[in-house]
Amino acid sequence: MKGAEFELQVPEESPWYGKRVKVSELKWFNSSPVLFLEGVTDRNAAESLIKAILLVDQPLGVSPQEPDAWYDHQLAGLKVYRDGMQIGVVARVDHLPAQDLLAIKTESGEVLLPFVKAFVPKVDTDAGLIEITPPGGLFEEIAEPEESEA
């Protein structure tokens, strides 16, 4: 990781606009990776990079080497099918500490689905689709039980 270079995505008014950064060190604190960047030597410089996005130079057609792994750009835009019917499109992938979530845009709004094999058994980037088997109630309203008169 040391020596890796990244392009930055920051607002035009940022002093980092149009610049690249180079990793000087990678350390782990409380199971979280922390990058140290060349030229970022104090807290003020580090705070000027809050919410900056590091862009990785990666050919779009290349997949990760791990099995059943994809880059976010390969998943965004894929059609989402459930029981043979298209129910939405992947808007983005949210990376949370516990697991990744697929943000699926449906007719009734956005639904977040845990990106686990039990709920997403098939991803076919060549065909442009994902098949899902979500738990009940995630993509539809669950009927309220009617109250019985006593």
Image (spheres, rainbow, N blue to C red):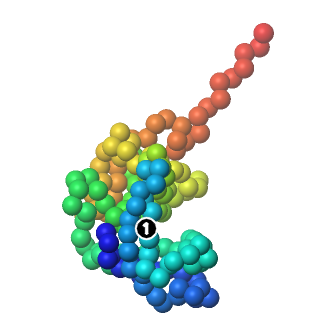
Find residue 75 and report its image quarter: bottom left
**Splitting the image into 4 quarters, where does residue 73 fall?**
bottom left
Amino acid type at image mark 1: Leu
Q: Residues within 10 Å of mark 1 (few under 14, many from 20)?
A: some
Asked if 141 appears above or below 101 in the picture, the reply is above
Where is the C terminus found, in terms of image quarters? top right
Q: In the rendered picture of this protein, how many numbered marks are placed on residues? A: 1
Q: Position of residue 35 (x, y in %)?
A: 43, 67
Label 1 sits on residue: 35
In this view, which residue lies farthest toward the front? 41
Q: Residue lying farthest right?
A: 150
Determine the image quadrant of residue 14.
Answer: bottom right
Q: Quarter of the image for the N terminus: give it.
A: bottom left
Please report the residue visible at 26 percent of the width from the left and 53 percent of the height from the top.
Answer: 68
Camera sees residue 53? yes
Expressed as whole percent of the image width and height from the top left, the position of residue 79 reads 39, 59
Q: Position of residue 19 (x, y in %)?
A: 46, 88
Residue at 38% in and 51% down: 81
Residue 47 position within the rendered picture, expressed as x and y whole percent measured from the top left? 60, 73
Q: Residue furthest top?
A: 150
The residue positioned 49% from the left and 35% from the top of the image is: 136
- Residue 29 as seen in the image, left or right of residue 147: left
The one of 107 and 12 positioned closer to us in this rendering? 12
Left or right of 135 on screen, residue 75: left
